């Protein structure tokens, strides 16, 4: 039998070494909730800023936006509680909470404006 010069002998009974990839690193705690909060806040803000004549009943659109903003606030606080100090999830959670709180304030102002306008118009008609 011929031997290879300088190479170690290979045994046919030895299976090749299994190649395994390293497991994916787990996501940062709170990141999914922070992204959900940011998404809810942006969708709520878009609903709040849509022109009235294109969206149908204004109070329905504003109410939906306000509900999404409240859900975003809840998700944002959960994300902030789960996130570790100094992680990207903390910054994203704070940004999402800011957008959700501002959007919620806009929604409350819209609903109050609609209620005040309705009361004023009813008073002007004498009813």
Image: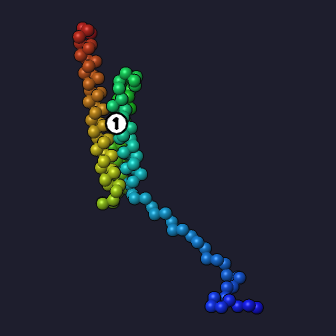
Split into 4 quadrants, where in the image is the N terminus?
bottom right
Q: Is residue 25 above or below residue 59?
A: below
Q: Residue furthest front?
A: 5
Q: Can you say which quadrant of the picture contains the C terminus?
A: top left
Residue at (39% x, 57% y) in the render: 29
Q: Position of residue 88 (x, y in %)?
A: 34, 56
* Residue at image coords 74%, 90%: 2
Name the residue nearer the viewer: 52 or 104: 52
Q: Nearer the viewer, residue 126 or 21?
A: 21
Give me the residue at 39% from left, 38% from top.
43
- The x and y percentages for residue 107 are 30, 32
Q: Position of residue 75 (x, y in %)?
A: 37, 46
Q: Is 78 left or right of 113, judged from the image as shown?
A: right
Q: Residue furthest top?
A: 126
Residue 35 drawn at (x, y percent): 39, 48
Badge 1 marks a residue whose secondary structure is helix
- Viewer can see residue 71: no
Q: Which residue is mark 1?
A: 45
């Amino acid at each position: 039998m011929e031997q290879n010069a300088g190479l170690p002998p290979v045994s046919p009974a030895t299976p090749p070494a299994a190649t395994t990839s390293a497991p994916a690193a787990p996501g940062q705690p709170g990141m999914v909730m922070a992204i959900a909060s940011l998404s809810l806040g942006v969708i709520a803000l878009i609903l709040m800023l849509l022109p009235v004549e294109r969206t149908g009943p204004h109070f329905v659109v504003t109410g939906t936006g306000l509900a999404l903003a409240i859900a975003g606030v809840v998700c944002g606080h959960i994300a902030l509680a789960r996130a570790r100090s100094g992680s990207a999830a903390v910054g994203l959670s704070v940004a999402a909470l800011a957008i959700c709180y501002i959007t919620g304030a806009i929604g409350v102002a819209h609903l109050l404006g609609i209620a005040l306008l309705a009361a004023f118009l009813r008073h002007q008609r004498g009813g």
